[in-house]
Amino acid sequence: MALDWTKCAAVESVPGKVSGAWVFRGTRLPVATIFENLEDGLSIEEIMEQFDVTREQVTAVLDFAARSLEAPIRR
């Protein structure tokens, strides 16, 4: 399932910038990089240090993804 990142203020997609991939606003760091590195076992602190992003940026992306994936409760 692909997320609709258009409503996440922390990211942008610019044609010609990283092939139009969703990146952290004002950077060339693809959003997917955060998820790949978390999957590989890096902590948020390690990601912040390695990729020069702020806790606020990472948290905004993770919060947006979590809210987007929440399924409505069926009764």
Image: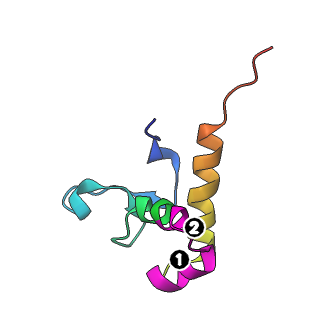
Q: Is residue 8 above or below residue 50?
A: above
Q: Nearer the viewer, residue 7 or 52?
A: 52
Which span of residues is magenta-colored? 37-51
> Of the residues shown, which amino acid type is indicated by label 1?
Ile
Split into 4 quadrants, where in the image is the C terminus? top right
Q: Residues within 10 Å of mark 1 (few under 14, many from 20)?
A: some
Picture coordinates of residue 1, whole percent (x, y): 46, 35
Q: Which residue is situated farthest in the front direction here?
A: 40
Q: CA distance from mark 1 to mark 2?
A: 9 Å
Residue wearing tag 2: 58
Q: Residue at x 18, y 60 (%)?
A: 16
Residue 15 image point, x, y percent: 22, 55
Which of the two discs, 1 and 2, labels the residue nearer the N terminus? 1
Q: Marks 1 and 2: CB-CB under 8 Å?
A: yes
Q: Main secondary structure of the magenta part?
A: helix
Identified at 64% across, 47% down, the residue is 66
In the picture provided, is 13 more to the left or to the right than 42?
Answer: left
Q: Indicate which disc residue 47 carries.
A: 1
